[in-house]
Amino acid sequence: MHAHLGDRLVVESPSTGVVRRDGEIIGLHHEDGTPPYDVRWSDTDDVTLVFPGPDAHVQHLETEADDTPSGTGTTGTVGDDTAVPRTSANPGDIGRRVAEERRRRGLSREETARRARISPQYLAYLEEQPSDPATATLFALAAALDTTAASLRGGGVDRPPGQGHALLHPRLNDLDQEESRRLLSTHGVGRVAVTAPDGRPAVVPVNYEVVDDAIVFRTRPGSVPAAAAGNEVAFEVDHVDEAMSQGWSVLAVGPATTVTDPDALRDLARRAHTEPWAGGTRDTWVSVRPTRLTGKRITPADQSARR
């Protein structure tokens, strides 16, 4: 018998084929994947050291039982070679959220694994590989990170940020020019405020870069962001730390122009970190050169002196 971290150990009745118990393998004791295993049982959430007997088999991580829901005792078992693909989570999303929450709270993998009662190797696997941990493991990780299983699965991905409670004693600080430039230079998604082609004001998100102190973004001719060219515009970028009720914002104001020089266009395309999320052909580059740059940061009052 060989297993990998995240596989499921299924124990069946040898006479009827009924699933008596199953659990997630969260710890290996041998590099070749041979027993024993640390198993978190789906019916009790307990973790035990298991030496599988002849009535047990392994279901590998990339597949899931066809007719045998976890821990239900349903007949019609499915072996290692008869299964259907998992479809309950986007590959890598859960691990990415776990890693982000862990770093946000300043926790090491070892400490997080200890709190969740899983091996550090399994936590590393979850964070670095496409995975869909068992419900019990997901709840254990959520408790260890002081969040919810729904959040780790992306349940709040469509909610706008800032719905948490405000700090008890917040302090709103002005950022100096150097700090504002540093934060602005972290390329990502910003918002450009323009007058749209129909004459109405609009604020639209764009993927942007900062090249030679200019804010640049790609768009299509005739689009709302393209209307920025030839006008003075405002460009804003921010970050919200939902868990800590903190954040910052930077506002840049300046004239926008369309980049037309062929050498400059090739250089921009070469230095671009990401493709526009909106997709499609977007080969019109707009450059905004800030003439005014301001920023704000919200922190707890007792941290303001250290900023």
Image (cartoon, rainbow, N blue to C red):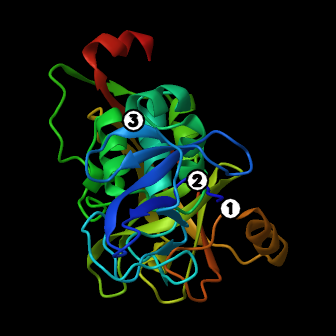
- Estimate the x, y position of residue 195 in percent, counting from the top left: 34, 74
Residue corresponding to mark 3 = 116
Q: Nearer the viewer, residue 272 or 229?
A: 272
- Which secondary structure, mark 3? helix
Is there any visible trace of residue 293 in the rendered image? Answer: no
Residue corresponding to mark 1 = 273
Q: Quadrant of the N terminus?
A: bottom right
Q: Is residue 76 above or below residue 194?
A: below
Which of the 4 quarters of the picture holds residue 10?
Answer: bottom left
- Estimate the x, y position of residue 222 in percent, counting from the top left: 48, 89
- Estimate the x, y position of residue 160 in percent, counting from the top left: 24, 58
What residue sits 53% from the left and 40% below the top? 183
Q: Is residue 197 left or right of residue 208?
A: left
Separation of marks 2 and 1 at Cα, in angstroms: 8 Å
Q: Nearer the viewer, residue 238 or 104?
A: 104
For marks 2 and 1, the one nearer the N-term is 2
The amino acid sitting under disc 1 is His
What residue sits 28% from the left and 63% below the top? 71
Q: Nearer the viewer, residue 142 or 269?
A: 142
Is there any visible trace of residue 191 in the rendered image? Answer: yes
